[in-house]
Image: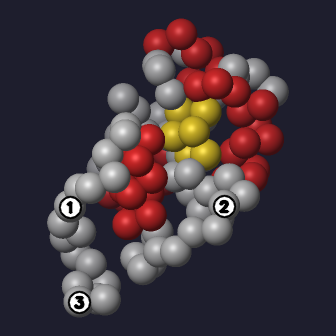
């Protein structure tokens, strides 16, 4: 598993988090089962880039033309719900530590 971001150098410099260059998705297609797009704001841009070189059956776009309801500022609750449903689990629970409004 790896995390990819076009600002991978800046994020590493500012926060010490190791991310991969998006180009790794093009060169390492056989090394992963799925790519999960979890960016609400840039989902369309990411899909357009991936279509050029990645088999689409490996891409799971959490924000593809669906109506979604989320309460977390970054749609983390929607992402978690979608991942669990993708795994066949309709009933689950999770804790969002650092939630903006823990009661909402």
Q: Are marks 2 and 3 in contact (CB under 8 Å)?
A: no
Task: Please name whichever residue, 87 or 77, is drawn nearer the observer in this view of the structure.
Answer: 87
The circle drawn on residue 66 is 2
Q: Are marks 1 and 3 in contact (CB under 8 Å)?
A: no
Q: Residue at x 34, y 52 (%)?
A: 90
Q: Residue at x 47, y 20 (%)?
A: 33
**Residue 42 visible in the current orientation:** no
The circle drawn on residue 103 is 3
State whether residue 47 is above or below residue 92.
above
Judge from the rendering whether residue 68 lies leftward or rightward of residue 90; answer left or right. right
Most distant residue in the top direction = 30
Q: CA distance from mark 1 to mark 3?
A: 14 Å
Q: How many marks?
A: 3
Q: Residue at x 27, y 78 (%)?
A: 99
Task: Please name whichever residue, 12 or 73, is drawn nearer the observer in this view of the structure.
Answer: 73
Tag 1 residue = 94
Judge from the rendering whether residue 91 lies leftward or rightward of residue 13; answer left or right. left
Q: Nearer the viewer, mark 2 or mark 3?
A: 2
Which of the 4 quarters of the picture holds residue 47? Answer: top right
Label 3: which secondary element: loop
Q: Quadrant of the N terminus?
A: top left
Q: Earlier in the sequence, mark 2 or mark 3?
A: 2
Within 10 angstroms of label 3, few (less than 14), some, or many (20 or more) residues?
few
Q: Where does residue 100 sit, x and y in percent of width and height?
A: 31, 85
Task: Please name whichever residue, 97 or 6, is drawn nearer the observer in this view of the structure.
Answer: 97
């Amino acid at each position: 598993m790896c995390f990819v971001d076009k600002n991978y150098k800046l994020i590493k410099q500012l926060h010490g988090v190791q991310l991969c260059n998006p180009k790794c998705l093009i060169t390492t297609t056989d090394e992963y089962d799925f790519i999960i797009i979890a960016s609400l704001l840039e989902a369309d841009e990411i899909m357009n880039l991936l279509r050029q070189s990645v088999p689409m059956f490996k891409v799971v776009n959490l924000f593809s033309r669906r109506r979604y309801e989320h309460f977390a500022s970054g749609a983390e609750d929607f992402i978690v719900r979608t991942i669990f449903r993708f795994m066949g689990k309709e009933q689950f629970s999770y804790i969002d530590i650092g939630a903006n409004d823990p009661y909402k």
